Amino acid sequence: MPTTLPTDPAANGAATVLKAAASAGANVCFANPGTTEMPIVSALDSMPGLRAVLGLHENVCTGAADGYARIAGKAALTLLHLGPGLANGLANLHNARRAHSPVVNLVGDHTSRHLAYDAPLTSDIAALARTVGSVRTARHRETLAEDLVAAVASATHRPGVASLVVPADLQQATWTGDPLDPDPVTCPPALVPDDRVAEVAEIVEKHGRDVVLLLGGPALSRTAQLAAGRVAAATGATLLAETFPARAERGGGLPGVDRLPYFPEAAVRALEGRQVVLAGAPDPVAYFGYAGMPSRLAPEHLVHRLSGPGQDGEHALVALAERLGGDLPGDDRAQAGAEERAGDRAGNPAAPGPALPPASQPLDGRSVGAALAALLPAGAIVSIEGGTCGYPFFTASAAAPAHTCLTNTGGAIGQGLPVALGAALAAPDRPVVALQSDGSGLYTAQALWSMAREHCDVVVLVAANHAYGVLRTELGRHGDPDPGPQARALTSLGEPRLSWTDLAHGLGVPASRATTVGELATRFTAARATPGPHLIEMAL
Amino acid sequence: MPTTLPTDPAANGAATVLKAAASAGANVCFANPGTTEMPIVSALDSMPGLRAVLGLHENVCTGAADGYARIAGKAALTLLHLGPGLANGLANLHNARRAHSPVVNLVGDHTSRHLAYDAPLTSDIAALARTVGSVRTARHRETLAEDLVAAVASATHRPGVASLVVPADLQQATWTGDPLDPDPVTCPPALVPDDRVAEVAEIVEKHGRDVVLLLGGPALSRTAQLAAGRVAAATGATLLAETFPARAERGGGLPGVDRLPYFPEAAVRALEGRQVVLAGAPDPVAYFGYAGMPSRLAPEHLVHRLSGPGQDGEHALVALAERLGGDLPGDDRAQAGAEERAGDRAGNPAAPGPALPPASQPLDGRSVGAALAALLPAGAIVSIEGGTCGYPFFTASAAAPAHTCLTNTGGAIGQGLPVALGAALAAPDRPVVALQSDGSGLYTAQALWSMAREHCDVVVLVAANHAYGVLRTELGRHGDPDPGPQARALTSLGEPRLSWTDLAHGLGVPASRATTVGELATRFTAARATPGPHLIEMAL
């Protein structure tokens, strides 16, 4: 009983939007559509260059788009249903914004004439979208392709989140005058001017060991870190990474660049009395404001910027290294140099990796971090969410084979599993590990189902300590080290006890449990040997 | 290592806010706090009149607050962490707004001075909050109590959603000049003027059988429906309920008021050529705009309003019935009258209830609807989400013992389980059933965990058809009855197959499975006999 006039799905507005997206270089669409997006859903099947991936919650879609964009280095699409669908995905869009990931949201809206009637699902979509990036609402059938390309361009150039609202009537409308193939949207990052590099070189040379080079964004590529390593070797400067990088290459002979500590006391100590040179990293500010602690982790006059997030930090660091000279020390240099020449991101298999802790050792943050560093296959991507195991792993993984770390950039929890999903789809030939805390993992556990449906080779390691651990710490910092029953209950995931193996089974993902390093190693190896996702609940 | 100055948790701003909330009548707080809400979390334990309930996702918290408010008839609090926490809860706040449920969000924010530094979790909280209701940001310690009372008043008087943003420094600050006990905020609904009732009476009398009385909001109380039944008996008018009532009393001898159909063709037919009198219901407009269908389901000049959502529709209908006379026909009248006098919401146990379909019958929307109507205990609350079983149950339940139905008011899916949680906490003496479709249930399955933690007597019936069924229908309506593989994949929850029993076990809730009416009846009876929640996966 179709009451709408069926339009040729290859010629309607929905097809125009998708065709323009594919031509502009956005080939994957993480979708949870509804009635107002049906023309787009129908048109997908006449669009071979565009792969649709269903997420069972919009925050899975937006987080996966972020993960995809981080690894693929180009824009990913989402397809979301009206204001509530966009609202559900906002938390991971917030994270994508902080990651400077190009994500383009296609958001359906009511047929234009219907908006005046305030039907139940009507809401202010543009106001929601504006909180995470740019937004445009399509108004004319004739300019739909341009609207889409402008959204991709906005997401790519900022880079960040762009939303395009497409009313249902425009999706259905035909028009024969479509421009066919927009060029792929690209955006080479802006070069840092030579005189800026020269100014920074002077500072680094003058202050030597009293310099911290704080690396972030594109300055955490392999090439950038190798260049930073040369600078450190020549000048004695200390290298640190931003606390929550969108994408950091690690291991395989790269210098051991640890992260700026999370808590402000330790971060202030790490930067104290130093000149702080920012390469791609944001201004060093505390994650939260605490009474008695400064918001800035270093005095403003001691902070210098080599490159910002939209700039080519890699090129700037190479230019800095060329000015300051310096070789990578010892083994690091030989190994890293060899890799660079061979273009082998897997690292030198002959180099000694980190040792696996004793098999009988129980699991805690430190033993899990060390074990995963030892078990990590070359070329892996690790999506890290949560501090319990995340910090120890990052530290330990400097000695692991070459791999890529993705972290939670914006602090909205529920990002680790979706990002792992998106990363796995962007790099189907690379093993993916999600190192996930339990509290945050529960926010978007539906991502497990999409991993199973898409046959993603992801090993999900859940750190099951059955608590919002960081909040227990924060209660203590707030002067409440012995919280009352309500405060305890609000920071506990026990009573009842969650079972991640049952949850995974429910979502179609095989799962097992580990309580010691030996069990973890056995399960991890078995999971790696089986195609598709596998979850290991680590009893901490 | 507390770096903040511990303040007396009974005298700081957090305590002021909570004390004012409890005094204003808001005694339950559905919470998922973070670092910026720790002072409020700490203060909860010195606030015996305020119960905190942890939700493992903010959309559980906001949906539960909505459910609580619908049953308790007064404001419920949420406690949310910054912009992303609020964003996560927006979908069910959208539904709460459409339900006219008084919900007050307490949203923490960074310490005021820290906002300038654009730390990772900084975002435009007020812009998000404005999309669902009123918002105020606390600026001064001295006026915190007033701010809170104003938020409760805003939520109660509109009624709807109100948000209060409380920066962390204000939560921590002490001040000894607090006013102690604001009065409870109440808001008797506005009376409909007599001359309006008289005008409507004239229309109803004149047009008789050509009148549809469309009941919604407060006009779906028992008293209001009994009055509407008298009007129908006297005039021949047809009674219909709005399609998605926030709270509708049903059964136990009430007139059989079915809902206005969802799809516009059927809804237009139901209203065609009739005078439409709105008692508490919104203007009858189509849920979505379809090409070739009007947005209005009835011409504007035939629509008359007796009472709006903020008005006392119950009183207006009683007044209308007094003008038009009429008795309830036969048994209905006797039974309903008896109940009214006895104040017994459980209905007349002697009246014949609906019959259970044959035990061997397989489960589908119709057999589930009929079976639940037959099995329903008197006094039950039923949270309905999803059409597959929801519509047939509502129709069948007219003959069931007296119960209360809660539906998804705003169309943002993921509302049924949280609303059931909130309803169960508001009415611990009443049995609660969640009749839940699988696709929408997956949005907020974390609510199951809170039901287990709070020992709520909820029977969750999941209609597992492994598809976004309504979208398959909508694809057909859009002219795509035989969708391609991508469109099929985007509307299917199969591959892999979800297991709701495993999901429930993972979240700490006992679960079973039923494939026939007989199995459903057995499991339902067993679930009812055991304290705490139980989930039954119904294989459709």
Image (spheres, coloured by chain):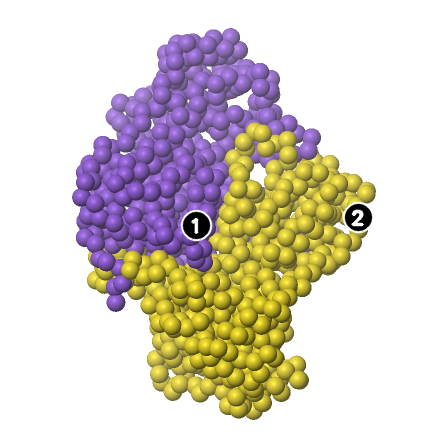
Chain colours: A purple, B yellow
> Whole-percent x and y of residue A252?
36, 30
State the mark number for residue B179.
2
Subunit under mark 2: B
Q: Residue B529, located in which quarter of the rendered image?
A: bottom right
Asked whether residue B535 is in view, the answer is: no
What residue do we see at 74% from left, 52% from top?
B19
> Whole-percent x and y of residue B347?
58, 84
User: Are the residues tagged 2 and 1 within 8 Å (C-beta)?
Assistant: no
Q: Name above or below for residue B480 compared with residue A217.
A: below
What residue do we see at 76% from left, 57% from top?
B183
Q: Name above or below for residue B20 compared with residue B299.
A: above
How many numbered markers are drawn? 2
Asked if badge 2 and badge 1 are on a common chain, one would say no
The residue tagged 1 is A83
> Whole-percent x and y of residue A448?
38, 53
Q: Residues within 10 Å of mark 2 (few under 14, many from 20)?
A: few
What residue do we see at 78% from left, 54% from top?
B181
> Whole-percent x and y of residue A527?
35, 51
Please state which amino acid type lies under the numbered disc 1. Answer: Gly
Q: Name above or below for residue A406 compared with residue B467.
A: above
Task: Decide if residue A188 is on the left or right side of residue B347.
Answer: left
Q: Residue B36, located in which quarter of the rendered image?
A: top right
Task: Decide if residue A90 is on the left or right side of residue A346.
Answer: right
Query: Which structural element holds mark 1?
Result: helix
Task: Decide if residue A427 is on the left or right side of residue B427.
Answer: left
Subunit under mark 1: A
Query: Which structural element holds mark 2?
Result: loop
Please state which amino acid type lies under the numbered disc 2. Answer: Pro
Q: CA distance from mark 2 to mark 1?
A: 40 Å
Taking depth in this image into account, of A84 and B283 the one nearest to the observer is B283
